[in-house]
Amino acid sequence: MKTYLQNVNAMLLLRRCHRLKPFGPLSINRNQVAPVVASCAVRLCSSSSNDQRFHQHGFSVSWRHVLAGLLAGTGAVLAYGLHHHKAIEKSSPLPIISQEEVTRHRSLKDGVWVTYKGGVYDITEFVSMHPGGEKIMMAAGGAIEPFWSLYAVHNQEHVLDILSGYKVGELDAEDLKKQYTFKSSDPYSSDPERHPVLHANSLKPFTAEPPPEILSDSYITPTAFFFKRNHLPVPQVDPDSYRLHVEGLPKGVLTLSLEELKTRFPKHTITATLQCAGNRRSEMNKAKQVKGLNWGVGAIGNATWSGAKLRDVLLAAGYGPDVAQWARHVQFEGLDKEITGSAYGASVPINKAISEEGDVLLAYEMNGEDIPADHGFPIRVVVPGVVGARSVKWLGKIVVSAEESSSHWQQKDYKGFSPGIDWDTVDYKSAPAIQELPVQSAITTPREGSVIDRSEEMLTVKGYAWSGGGREVIRVDVSLDGGKTWNVAKLKSSDKEGDQTSPPLGRAWAWKLWEITVPLPPEAQELELICKAVDNSYNTQPDTFGPIWNVRGLLGNAWHRVKVKINEDDDEE
Amino acid sequence: MKTYLQNVNAMLLLRRCHRLKPFGPLSINRNQVAPVVASCAVRLCSSSSNDQRFHQHGFSVSWRHVLAGLLAGTGAVLAYGLHHHKAIEKSSPLPIISQEEVTRHRSLKDGVWVTYKGGVYDITEFVSMHPGGEKIMMAAGGAIEPFWSLYAVHNQEHVLDILSGYKVGELDAEDLKKQYTFKSSDPYSSDPERHPVLHANSLKPFTAEPPPEILSDSYITPTAFFFKRNHLPVPQVDPDSYRLHVEGLPKGVLTLSLEELKTRFPKHTITATLQCAGNRRSEMNKAKQVKGLNWGVGAIGNATWSGAKLRDVLLAAGYGPDVAQWARHVQFEGLDKEITGSAYGASVPINKAISEEGDVLLAYEMNGEDIPADHGFPIRVVVPGVVGARSVKWLGKIVVSAEESSSHWQQKDYKGFSPGIDWDTVDYKSAPAIQELPVQSAITTPREGSVIDRSEEMLTVKGYAWSGGGREVIRVDVSLDGGKTWNVAKLKSSDKEGDQTSPPLGRAWAWKLWEITVPLPPEAQELELICKAVDNSYNTQPDTFGPIWNVRGLLGNAWHRVKVKINEDDDEE
């Protein structure tokens, strides 16, 4: 049986690169959220041995990056659209405003003004509606261009439409000249190349997932197909000059080179699944509009990770009983930076970080090779059992603290709320930062809308299942009739046939793949396939998305439902 | 505002004991599963200070035990009923059979025969249908009376009906005489007295729950109202001669008196919720018939427990790194015994038992007083975050082992299965023994079917929420409209107003009570109230019972739904 990848490979070879015409610059208007194909010259990256499968036919071509479904910012598009009525015409000539005056407007109290290409805009009213939340305040009192080049989702015509509605003046010409000394080069220009089979949800920052079928093809997700969720441009790190700083301990700062990390501490290897908190957001989005990248079921992957144990490094840096008295969190800072210079950051509870059984790694290898740039070269902290956002890439600093990370992503994002809470009522302080994730499963094949020939008689359904906190998945139930009756799927803990070994209790960091082959029900013309998993705390997935809906579209773990049709017409064969 | 208990108290005082007529011996026929009132002289037990509230009016009366809703064995009744057609008339005279011959029939291969009051019965066919599972095999080849006196659910007319269908002969008269030397005294005769407000699900063994409103009356459940789920008669233990044996460690057996347990080890106190795996089975039962006691939402309670840490005792008994190499489980044996002499038993994973943060206690106090007889006097192991069945009462023996407890309750009960698995297909080896329980919540007030006056304008809904594994409940969502819209309830972590202190991460052993007061929806005539909880792993409860249905009716944690009516007629006031 051909794997899905082999099929994709064959398909890619059929469609030669030079037959794809570039479409010119990205342009999506407000009414067009259907997939577009963008030009983006990308060569196959060769950092993973798995990519060799694509070279095996002797081709050495440059593919253009096929970006099926550029749905990044769909949420933003709709949210902006709601407020577009504010973009009314203003016909009277606008005053000239100095940069000094603009700079005075950097708070909700004083008003929030920004400049864009010589125009001055009072966006005070818009702040609460901004899909990106309070991050918009970083631009208050200054130019918005640097931020838009970082968050490229703004490079859309309708965003300018909305902005124009808030115009209050023209920036003084002298001030404008000074301002334009800002170097507007693309901070993403040095991002690495990506595999063309990935479906990008956004380009800047780059976020992408593989087709779901690939996930069930192999127990270990090949590195090139592992989902990517960057928050900022990929930093270019020189492994020789790289230093990791461990701070907050009585001995003072411990600074470690990459070589020291590799040689001073035992090398540990774990197999762990990482999942984005937004995985399956597209399904929650159907229950009711949410904000965020429109992930399918592919924002999850399973890899082997090797590196030093965070515990060992903390002990070497002076962690001891005295520190245990006051330390509550371990904060991580990436080398990926905002315009303001502040780094991507997150933290995990100290007991997860210091526990022998917590298995938190400072990983320098992914699937047996150096961690590639997109996944955090040279060091990524891997926090198994915990939401992907805490496994900080391009790790630059570790801080032992009494406090959580103060970063946006710890405090104002990656939290879950009641379905009754909307953007008007959300209080980020009221919910804890997501750490352990709930039990999850999804069908990877067949896909929604597939047609199955009646003559095939049997149907095979495949998927993945995983739970946070090291809780092992003990069962996956599969229904063919929308949840009326249920069958138990066969679980796989490795690619070895019949391998049923269990990980140590509380340390089941890796997913299980599952599979079930059942006879096609004789009468049915359409099947509603459903899967749901149970972990060893006997937690299970909720039935529907509506009641777990939350403003940020996170933690989407309701039953996965896939409708397929049965084709009764045997004559076509 | 009067508490529910005060109301119950007043009600009980109104109904004087001597006005209740005993109904004579228990009799329930197959078509009568409605509540019956049985006679059972019980004085108020005075082991708990809370009971003093019942004495405060100067009354010192003996109440008869009001057993509203003796639903014990309802599952059994129906399961038996299914096979009642087998009880066909056999008119030809039956042969005389010797005890020797009966004794030869003690396996499915040789046939399973039992005797009852001089009759011989071939129950081979019935073994697989027995609601109590394989325990019926204990009686194979002998008299069934001793077992029926232990499991009093069998003392029902229809059980005899079913048995009669399997009659194959008469026991030899001489053998019958010898057999009747068996002392048929009631092993439950020394069971302690119980509070009359408890709703008993079965009397022998005694299992009972409080009215739900009592649960939300106080953060700490008064001992007298704490649910009771005994599996066997309550053993009478003399505290002076009591000895606890710790086995399986290289130093040999460590034997500890009660005094030694109290003085040799530091006293620890935790507040922990215990929940029966069958809590809320009555709701699952409505989705589809299950086997087991028909619990409402009251098979849960929250108490303070004080005692020695199991960890400390294991270390004193010689637990160390060598033992850690091979030890995987800690087994517990109660002093409550089967007819065969085998004890109630269970086990927990070694890492739960030995962990500093696991907080497993060998408790000698419950709510600040000696643990009462029904809850395990003098020592109960309390395993917080784990299903109640592992918190073995009347603890007699601890065994460190590479294996789980081999007891019926660990191996053949207290496991969860797919809704697609029935008694015909269940394979107990295929599921892990329940340890940590999933996230749970229920409404304690108002009750199903309550009528609320429109003039009250506001509605207050109360309940409890808890999760296994030390995971803290972070939110309870409440709906008044069957799940369409949701409100966030106020959580209580103690009886202190405004106390929002959180337990250490991963050690949230105690429930939260919750409460919400909302305006009555203007149009509605009926409300479907729902609650669902979320824990700090963001696990949540499934929407419905059907898809979590399982043969044993365990792990019932779907949304709790309560329908109430709104009375629009103000004139009656």
Image (tube, coloured by chain):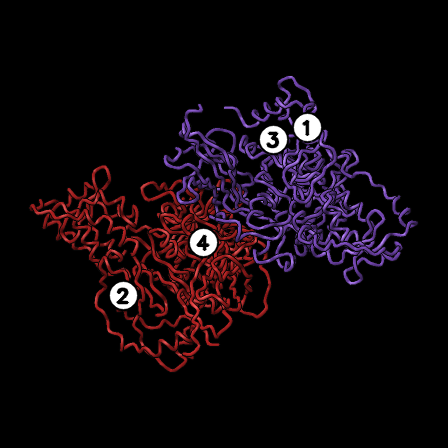
Chain colours: A red, B purple
Disc 4: which residue: A558
Residue type marked 3: Pro
- Determine the CA span between mark 4 and mark 2: 29 Å
Disc 3: which residue: B222
Q: Would residue B213 be visible to someone looking at this image? A: yes
Identified at 43% across, 58% down, the residue is A380
Disc 1: which residue: B47
Identified at 34% across, 53% down, the residue is A292
Q: Residues within 10 Å of mark 1 (few under 14, many from 20)?
A: some
Disc 2: which residue: A36
Is label 3 on the same chain as label 4? no
- Determine the CA span between mark 4 and mark 1: 47 Å
**Does the residue at mark 1 contact the one at mark 2 (Cβ under 8 Å)?**
no
Residue type marked 4: Ala
User: Tag 1's secondary structure?
Assistant: loop
Residue A359 at x, y percent in the picture: 52, 55
Residue type marked 1: Ser
User: Tag 4's secondary structure?
Assistant: loop
- Dot 1: chain letter: B
Front-lying residue, B202 or A572: A572
Reading the chain from its start, which is encountered first: label 4 or label 2? 2
